[in-house]
Image: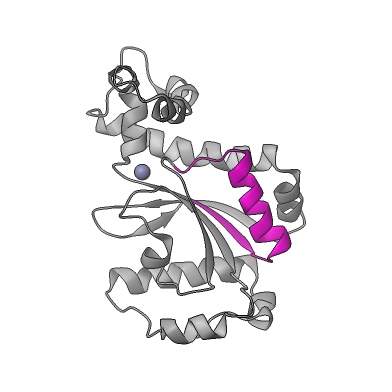
Amino acid sequence: MKAHTHETQSTITPEKALEILTEGNQRFVNNLKANRDLLGQVNATREGQWPFAVILSCIDSRTSAELIFDQGLGDVFSVRIAGNFVNQDILGSMEFGCNVAGSKLVVVLGHTKCGALKGGLDAAQIQGMGMDNLNHLINHFDPIINDIIEEGEERSSKNGDLLERLNQQNVKSAIEDIRTQSSTLKKLEDEGKIKIVGANYDVETGVVTWL
Ligand SMILES: [Zn+2]
C-alpha cells in the first residue's frame, strides 16, 4: 500500500474516506494488516503529506488511530487528548487538517472503558489528589454527566451503564462543539466538502462502530 499523494487525496470524497477507514478497521480485527513499506513511505512523503482524514481519539494506549484503522505514514492526522474532546487548539488543528491540508473527514472516536471518563465520574476522589491540571481536564465532562445522569443514579466509574452513556454523549458533544465553535469546519461540512462523524472503539474486540 502506497502513501497518499495530492492526486489520490483530491479524488477521495468524504464517503470514500469513511469507507477506507471502515475497511482498515476490518483488516485490523481480522489480523490482515496491509503490506506497507513504512521506510518507503518516509521517502514517498518527504516533500509533503496529503492525509484524507482527521481523527480525534483518546490518549489511551489501546486507541492509536493508525493501528486500529490500519493506516500508514501520511494517511491521517491524529489528534489525541484524554477523553477525546475539543478545545480551541484542537479545533485549530482540525481546521489545519481540513481547510489547509485537504482532509475530507473528521472522526471523533470515543472508546469503551475510558479512564478519562471514569475520572470524570469519580471527580470527587480525583480532586483530593491535588493534580490541578488533571482536575481541569476532567471538569470538562461535568456538564455532560449532569445532563445524562438520572435521579438517584450512582455517579461512579463502577456504574458501567453510566460510563458507556457518557462515552456516547461525550462523542456527540464533541461533534456539536466542532460545529458551533468552528465556523470553518461547519462551512466545509455544509458545502459537502467534509463529513464530521462519531465512532466508538471497543477495547475488548478492536471493532470500531460508527455512531
Ligand atoms: Zn480514554
| Left/right of residue 151 with respect to residue 181 in the rendered view | left
**Residue 14, image quadrant:** bottom right
Task: Pinpoint residue 121: horizontal percent, then vertical percent.
Answer: 33, 25
Residues drawn in magenta? 84-108
106 in magenta: yes
* Quadrant in the rendering for residue 135: top left
* Numbered label tally: 0
Tell me what residue is drawn at x 25 percent, y 28 percent. Answer: 159
Residue shown at the point (60%, 67%) measured from the top left: 15
**Picture quadrant where residue 45 is located:** bottom right
Camera sees residue 73 = yes
Horizontal and vertical percent position of residue 124: 32, 17
Q: Nearer the viewer, residue 64 or 189?
A: 64
Rendered-image quarter of ligand 1 = top left
162 shown above or below 6:
above
Question: With respect to residue 22, does 8 lie above or below?
Answer: below
Q: Position of residue 100 (x, y in %)?
A: 72, 62
* Display coloring: one colour
What residue sits 37% from the left and 85% below the top? Answer: 35
Magenta span has 43? no
Which percent across, then down, holds residue 41? 49, 82
Residue 1 shows in this picture: no
